[in-house]
Image (cartoon, coloured by chain):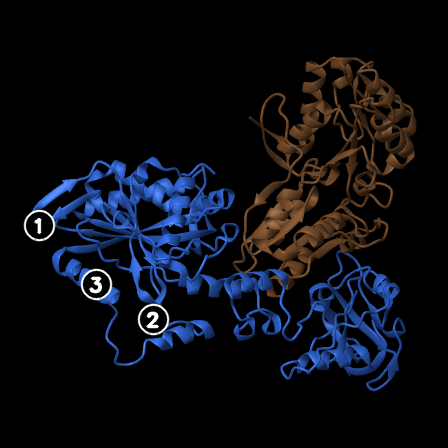
């Protein structure tokens, strides 16, 4: 066991995989000589060479397209989008080529796309988005979103071992803020939800950076016993865990950092409406970023992102219902 | 935004706006309107000056200026209300309606199914009141889970007093009835209320819920005690007359139990039972019978669990060879014997051979009791409510801080004829250590 930041846990997973499996290679903009925009791959080029830690042109379509080809012939490519926002340039290669390859041609595409996502640091509209729901909507792609250092490493190992394309949503705001004990070596975290805190009066369902917000917002709600469910994986979605929490708690708040409409939480709400109806004791409440671009201005950004106060207020309202 | 609706009056506050991260106050330069003037949303209401900028403050809503609270040249902190605007139509009317909602209208007007485009616009940055407030209280409509539990237990919901907003019946309200009533099939396994389904005692007088009140009334004045009551009375009195009863308490931090029990979906009682068994193994002198002068330590642990039979009384079925059971096994056995006890299906074997008893009447929030020893046993452990309390905790470096922890007080009544206080204290300390040391 070592204590690592979320970012170090991601680096550690990549380093362990590169050492353990010669099929693993990394591709991305400035990840080699420069060590990556966030220094996730700092020193990697020196250890593994620039053939395995490849600096690419500023062309996301080319990065993912090459990686799909490499995956199909048996490599285990891990692509870094410098910011998850830039995935739009590689959308076709990921959604249409990688996502449908197995369906059309019975070929596995063991590809991981790392997507540094999320706001909270005044990155503005092009560097703060949470595009995970786009890929939840596209068949053939798995989507995971860790909230802790241990899960960041375990989920990345599991994603690299998975025979399907996996979008690995790593939250930039957590990179150096979240620290925790991380087991040594290679281990897999299952693509299932995790009860971050058990409770019985209400459950707050969240993932990524919103897990910590949910935990802090419900730390002390006049003695109410509030469960926090960390989804960890969005595709596959751990429906059993969600319905199980709903059955016990009967009141649900769903928090998304992504824009409200059709966000991951919307799918969770729909699931509960369809299969958890008999267990509900109040409306399913959602807290999310309104359908606006993320502002540069720090106070404006704080106003649109779901913060502790907004989540707490929503919880109070629902508890009193 | 520099406005927020004041709930009861239909007035909207105009506050000193936050003009920059470091700006804490502003000075009023000029009012553009007077009391009684109409004003439109976004129209300038006043001018202010801060140490960073001078600016105009727009009205947050359309209405009539009702109050002006800050004079020209006065400097006030950010957030201070400078004026109030009376809102015409919608908002004000709605506020009035909710203010007199006690006199419920015959047909509760549901929040108007506003046209979706309006929702999209105004809902963009949801104000806190936006969500749950909209779901307001249908005179007598019930949520799915409340309806289901009521149907399963034959509860007439129209007679249930709700504790939710506007008297709404919540899941907790109907569960309280189900558990308090102790009738029928009990709560389903998924819904263990905190720890007390096995509660042995009924409070007397009964809390004022209609159903319970009805049954309590059945015990009319002047009637003789039931056979079971007489037996309980005689047994308890004999114990007090015979044993040298002494009670010792210890406080335990239940954080780990609370965390672990949520994972295993079992009651805290099962954990306390397991910790008690472990403690009895360390201190076998308490797992014994004292009959006259004959004191016998018993090799196996047969654990009695006091179970309430509603108004009829209580009974103590025994889990034989309880030391062989895990926490989950104990939880299952406790549920099973409690169910059979309430269905009056216990056999003679089920209530014989107990070597130690646990009682758990904390359901109503009581925190300490002096339980009576179930002779010929020499000890009985009492588990009361788990209550969040501020406690002093010490970290690895020896620094003290105050933390909020779920605490409980464990009480042990013991027979001074069989043992002494030091042993009872050691036993309680062992139970405490086991409960606090559970692997997270």
**Which of the two discs, 3 and 1, sits closer to the camera?**
3
**Which of the two discs, 2 and 3, sits closer to the camera?**
3
Which percent across, then down, holds residue A187? Answer: 62, 24
Residue on which disc 1 sits: B292
Q: CA distance from mark 2 to mark 1?
A: 34 Å
Identify which residue, A26 or A295, lies in the foreground: A26
Residues flagged by tags 2 and 3 on a common chain: yes
Residue for point 75% across, 78% down: B94
Q: Quadrant of the N terminus of chain B?
A: bottom right
User: Can residue A29 be seen?
Assistant: no
Residue for point 47% across, 42% down: B260
Q: Which chain is blue?
A: B
Residues flagged by tags 3 and 1 on a common chain: yes
Residue A14 vertical position relative to residue A318 in the rendered view, above or below: above
Residue on which disc 3 sits: B231
Query: Are the residues tagged 2 and 1 within 8 Å (C-beta)?
Result: no
Residue A84 vertical position relative to residue A283 in the rendered view, above or below: above
The numbered mark at residue B204 is 2
Secondary structure beneath disc 1?
A: loop
Q: CA distance from mark 2 to mark 3?
A: 18 Å
């Amino acid at each position: 066991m070592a204590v690592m930041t979320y970012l170090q846990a991601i680096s550690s997973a990549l380093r362990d995989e590169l050492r353990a499996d010669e099929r693993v290679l990394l591709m991305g903009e400035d990840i080699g000589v420069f060590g990556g925009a966030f220094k996730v791959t700092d020193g990697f080029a020196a250890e593994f060479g620039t053939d395995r830690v490849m600096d690419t042109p500023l062309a996301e379509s080319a990065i993912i397209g090459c990686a799909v080809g490499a995956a199909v012939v048996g490599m285990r490519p891990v692509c870094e989008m410098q910011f998850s926002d830039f995935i739009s340039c590689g959308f076709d290669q990921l959604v249409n080529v990688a996502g449908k390859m197995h369906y059309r041609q019975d070929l596995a595409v063991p590809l991981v796309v790392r997507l540094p996502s999320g706001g909270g640091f005044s990155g503005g509209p092009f560097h703060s988005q949470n595009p995970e729901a786009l890929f939840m909507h596209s068949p053939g792609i798995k989507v995971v979103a860790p909230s802790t250092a241990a899960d960041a490493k375990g989920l990345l190992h599991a994603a690299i071992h998975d025979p399907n394309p996996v979008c690995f949503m790593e939250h930039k705001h957590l990179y150096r803020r979240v620290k925790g004990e991380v087991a040594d070596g290679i281990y897999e975290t299952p693509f299932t939800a995790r009860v971050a805190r058990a409770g019985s009066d209400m459950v707050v369902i969240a993932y990524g950076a919103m897990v910590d917000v949910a935990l802090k917002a419900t730390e002390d709600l006049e003695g109410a016993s509030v469960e926090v469910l960390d989804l960890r994986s969005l595709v596959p979605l751990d429906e059993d865990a969600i319905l199980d929490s709903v059955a016990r708690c009967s009141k649900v708040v769903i928090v998304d950092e992504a824009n409200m409409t059709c966000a991951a939480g919307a799918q969770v709400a729909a699931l509960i409406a369809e299969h958890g109806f008999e267990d509900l004791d109040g409306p399913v409440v959602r807290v999310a970023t309104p359908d606006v671009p993320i502002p540069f201005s720090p106070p404006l950004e704080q106003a649109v992102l779901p913060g502790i106060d907004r989540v707490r207020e929503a919880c109070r309202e629902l508890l009193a219902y | 935004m520099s406005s927020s609706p004041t709930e009861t009056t239909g007035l909207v506050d105009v506050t000193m706006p936050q003009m920059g991260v470091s700006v804490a106050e502003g000075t009023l330069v000029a009012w553009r309107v007077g009391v009684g003037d109409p004003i439109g949303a976004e129209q300038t209401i006043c001018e202010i000056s801060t140490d960073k900028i001078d600016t105009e403050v727009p009205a947050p809503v359309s209405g009539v200026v009702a109050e002006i609270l800050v004079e020209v040249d006065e400097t006030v902190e950010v957030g201070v209300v400078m004026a109030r605007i009376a809102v015409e139509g919608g908002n004000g009317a709605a506020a009035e309606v909710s203010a007199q909602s006690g006199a419920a209208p015959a047909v509760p007007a549901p929040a108007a199914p506003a046209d979706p485009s309006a929702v999209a616009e105004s809902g963009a940055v949801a104000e806190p009141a936006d969500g749950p407030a909209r779901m307001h209280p249908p005179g007598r409509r019930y949520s799915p889970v409340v309806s289901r539990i009521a149907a399963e237990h034959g509860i007439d919901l129209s007679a249930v007093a709700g504790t939710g907003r506007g008297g709404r019946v919540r899941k907790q309200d109907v569960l309280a009835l189900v558990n308090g009533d102790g009738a029928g099939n009990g709560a389903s396994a998924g819904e263990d209320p905190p720890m007390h389904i096995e509660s042995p005692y009924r409070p007397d007088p009964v809390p004022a819920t209609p159903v319970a009140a009805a049954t309590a009334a059945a015990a009319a004045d002047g009637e003789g005690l039931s056979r079971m009551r007489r037996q309980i009375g005689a047994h308890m009195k004999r114990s007090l007359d015979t044993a040298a009863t002494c009670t010792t308490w210890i406080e335990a931090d239940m954080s780990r139990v609370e965390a672990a029990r949520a994972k295993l979906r079992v009651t805290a009682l099962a954990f306390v039972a397991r910790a008690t068994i472990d403690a009895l193994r360390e201190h076998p002198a308490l797992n014994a019978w004292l009959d006259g002068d004959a004191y016998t330590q018993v090799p196996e642990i047969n654990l009695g669990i006091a179970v309430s039979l509603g108004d009829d009384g209580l009974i103590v079925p025994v889990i034989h060879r309880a030391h062989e059971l895990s926490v989950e096994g104990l939880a299952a056995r406790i549920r099973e014997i409690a169910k059979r006890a309430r269905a009056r299906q216990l056999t003679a074997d089920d209530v014989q051979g107990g070597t130690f008893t646990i009682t758990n009447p904390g359901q109503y929030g009581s925190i300490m009791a002096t339980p009576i020893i179930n002779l010929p046993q020499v000890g009985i452990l009492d588990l009361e409510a788990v209550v969040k309390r501020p406690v002093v905790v010490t970290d690895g470096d020896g620094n003290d801080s105050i933390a909020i922890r779920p605490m409980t007080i464990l009480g042990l009544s013991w027979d001074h004829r069989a043992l002494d206080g030091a042993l009872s204290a050691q036993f309680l300390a062992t139970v405490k250590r086991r409960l606090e040391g559970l692997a997270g």
